[in-house]
Amino acid sequence: MEDAALPLTSHLTELRDRILKILAAWLIGAIAAWSWSEEIFALLLAPAVQALGEDGALQAIAPTEIFFTYLKSALLAGFGIALPVIFWQIWSFIAPGLYPSEKRVAVPFVLVSTLLFLSGGLFGYTFVFPLIFDFFVGFESEFVIAAWTMREVFTLTTRLILAFGTGFEMPVVVFFLAVSGLVTPRQLLGGFKYAVLVSFVMAAVLTPPDVISQVMLAVPLLVLYLLGVAVAYVFAPAKAPRADADTIQSSKGEGAA
């Protein structure tokens, strides 16, 4: 726990270094993905193009729109490539404040967090995106034709990928809440009704204003919450909250003195 005694400036310096490493990994990933930016863009926007039908095509209404959308596609792919480094840097920053038993899950944390984020994005892309774009194109009429721009569709797609990826980190958050002793698995299970409220609020904030995407995000969040509670029941040690444990330990020390 010597790291806890470091001055604030040292922690800020370490945080800056971690952020720089994350940005460097992201940049390297984006550069590596640039050669396939057009293919990445085509893959990302395939659900929207399919929803528009055989004659549907996305439009570019600004001279720089195609270039910058391809650049953003490379950046998004680079973010996915850099995820293990990102989670490792996050772990390295918070690890000094953890107990030795909690520090042992560093590699599982990085692997599971990366897989969950990618699984969330893949789930949204495979099952939710087609429903969302079909929903929006359904508002076409004889006097209104859907003519979406590549920038707007890419923005919506990216937002949804990040929303589903972040949402699928729920088991990791729940697990560490239990393992750290902040709450017990029983308390987490008892707070399921609040988890329902939070999940639907998060879904409403992160997704477009349609019921389909909100429900399709909120329901997996609840399932993942329960999964996190189940994993916490299995692996979380039966111990008092961190504050209580520290109090007991200090009391024993005073008694021995």
Image: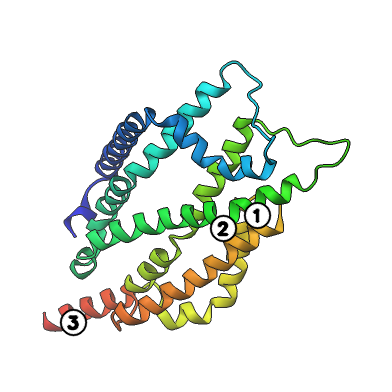
Query: Can you say whether 163 is above or below 188 in the image?
Result: above
Residue 146's spot in the image, x, y percent?
75, 37
Residues at marks 1 and 3, CA–CA distance in whole angstroms:
60 Å
* 2 or 3: tag closer to the N-terminus: 2
Element on which disc 3 rests: helix
Q: Which residue is mark 3?
A: 252
Q: Residue at x 16, y 83 (%)?
A: 255
Q: Residue at x 37, y 70 (%)?
A: 175
Residues at marks 1 and 2, CA–CA distance in whole angstroms:
7 Å
Display colour scheme = rainbow
Residue placed farthest to the left in the image?
A: 257
Q: Which residue is mark 2?
A: 127
Which of these two is toward me, 234 or 217? 217
Element on which disc 2 rests: helix
In which quadrant of the rendered view does residue 91 lie?
Answer: bottom left
- Indicate the quadrant containing the C terminus: top left, top right, bottom left or bottom right: bottom left
Q: Is residue 241 left or right of residue 68?
A: left
The circle drawn on residue 131 is: 1
Q: Is residue 21 left or right of residue 213?
A: left
The circle drawn on residue 123 is: none
Residue 73's spot in the image, x, y percent?
47, 34
Residue placed farthest to the front in the image?
A: 54
Residues at marks 2 and 3, CA–CA distance in whole angstroms:
55 Å
Which of these two is toward me, 106 or 18? 106
Under mark 2, the amino acid is: Phe
Q: Residues within 10 Å of mark 1 (few under 14, many from 20)?
A: some
Residue 101's spot in the image, x, y percent?
20, 70
Q: Residues within 10 Å of mark 3 (few under 14, many from 20)?
A: few
